[in-house]
Every structure is written in structure tokens, then in C-alpha cells.
Image (cartoon, helix red, strand yellow):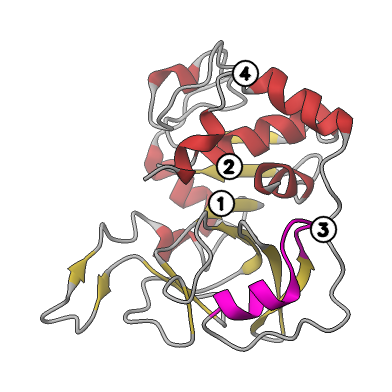
Amino acid sequence: MMVVAMARLLRDGERVFHGVASPLPMIAILLAQRLHAPNLVYINITGGINALPETLPRTTVDPRLTHGSHVIFKLAEIFDMSARGDLDTAFLSGVQIDGAGRINMSVIGPYERPKVRLPGGAGSAAILPTARRTLLWRTRHDPRTFVEELAFVTAAGNVDRVVTPLCIFVKREGRLQLESIHPYSSAEEVRAQTGFKVETEGVPLTPAPTTEELAALHAIDPQSVRLIEFKG
């Protein structure tokens, strides 16, 4: 459901980027190209442009993601592209996400003496405010992940949607609002698992994956690389 929902958000002709630890965005981009966005320009963190990997790697920094590329980009050029306003869509994530769509990838607890020190923003503070839009995703949806107040704001900016295992949020008037609830979840579950207040009345169900979408997904990802993010 998540990878299909993410693919549906992508538009034909866009320049779309994903970074490290991004199996779901990787597969979603390839799925969108196959189904409805053949002119989408796929940019990955290895520097590949419109790569056609023969097999999907388990890590998104694998050199196989340069196979078939039109050209090879340096990572610094991705940030320059975003700063110029030429990057249409970026996929980012966060250990914590608040009701304003801001992300924390830095620390849990006081910054000077944190309970947990996280891996850091990895460029998200440069891309999130400058890409024309950002799609956030997180494979865990619970009150520790979707919080009222972040322990630390690593990045904030042009968030468009947030895709989770339970729902899709859309950012309107500076706040995340429910756009749809996945068909196997419920309004009660989303409210219980979200640490900030959400309005669920009248929110529709996310359309279930179609036969065509599922067939294309299995053709692109026969080894189920998409499930890696749900393990552990």
C-alpha cells in the first residue's frame, strides 16, 4: 500500500530524487515510471539519472543504481539543483515527524545530553526547504514517531505529503491533515497512533492497489526488496 501510494503522488515530467536508506522511494519511482509517468526523471544518491538497474539492490547506495544511466551526477550537484529550484520532488524521512511536517534526525532528549544520538540530517536541511515539494515517508506510525513536539528540529520546509503504514497526510495551512486512511486501518487506529491531534471525520479510504499496480510492482521488485524497511 505504501509504495503504491507513493508512486501515485509522482507526476510525469518531474525531476525526482531519493537519498540513502530509501528502498520504498526507489521502487515507487520505478513503479510510477512504468505506470503513469514515463517522462519522470529519476535521480538517485549514487548519481544515476534514469537508471535501469538489472536487479534491485538492498541498499540505495549500491553502484547498481547507476546502471543504464544517461549521465552520472555528483552529490553536490543535487544540492545545487535543489537550491536553484530545479528539483521538483524529493523523498525524505525522519525518526520523528511533528504536526507541522518538521523532522528530527538528530537527537532524542536534550541536545547537550541526549538519550539517543541519531544519524543526522544527511542533507535534509538543505533539500527540504529548497526542493519544490518533499514527500515524507515513515514505515512506523506510532505516538513516538508522530509527535506533538520534536526533541530537535533537523529540517523543515516544503512538505507536501506524508505516507505511513496507516494513512496519507497532506500539509495544509502549515499543519498535517489526514487526506486518506488505508483500507486495512481505521480512524480510531490513526487517532490512537498519532501523537498530535488529527481530524478523522469524513476522511476517505486510500484506494486499494489495483491489479495493474500490483502486477507492475511484482515485476519491478520480485525479490520484495520493499519489505526491508519493515524489518527490525
Query: Which of the two labelled residues, at mark 1 and mark 2, occupies the earlier sequence position?
Result: 2
Query: Which of the two labelled residues, at mark 3 and mark 2, occupies the earlier sequence position?
Result: 2
Quarter holding residue 232: top left
Between the C-alphas of marks 1 and 4, the distance is 23 Å
SS label for mark 2: helix
Query: Which of the two labelled residues, at mark 3 and mark 4, occupies the earlier sequence position?
Result: 3
Query: Mark 2 sits on what residue?
Result: 25
Q: Amino acid at mark 1?
A: Phe
State the residue at coordinates (82%, 33%). Answer: 213
Between the C-alphas of marks 1 and 2, the distance is 7 Å
Viewer-nearest of discs 1 and 2:
2
Q: Amino acid at mark 3?
A: Thr
Q: Is residue 47 left or right of residue 5?
A: left
Numbered marks: total: 4
Between the C-alphas of marks 3 and 4, the distance is 24 Å
In the image, residue 14 above or below residue 107: above
Between the C-alphas of marks 4 and 2, the distance is 16 Å
Viewer-nearest of discs 3 and 2:
3
Q: Which mark is residue 222?
A: 4
Q: Amino acid at mark 2?
A: Pro
Query: Mark 3 sits on what residue?
Result: 206
Q: Residues within 10 Å of mark 3 (few under 14, many from 20)?
A: some
Asked if labels 4 and 1 touch by Cβ distance under 8 angstroms, the answer is no
Q: Residues within 10 Å of mark 1 (few under 14, many from 20)?
A: many
Q: Is residue 193 left or right of residue 174?
A: left
Query: Mark 1 sits on what residue?
Result: 91
Asked if labels 2 and 1 touch by Cβ distance under 8 angstroms, the answer is yes
Query: Which of the two labelled residues, at mark 3 and mark 1, occupies the earlier sequence position?
Result: 1
SS label for mark 3: loop
192 is within the stretch colored magenta: yes
Viewer-nearest of discs 3 and 1:
3
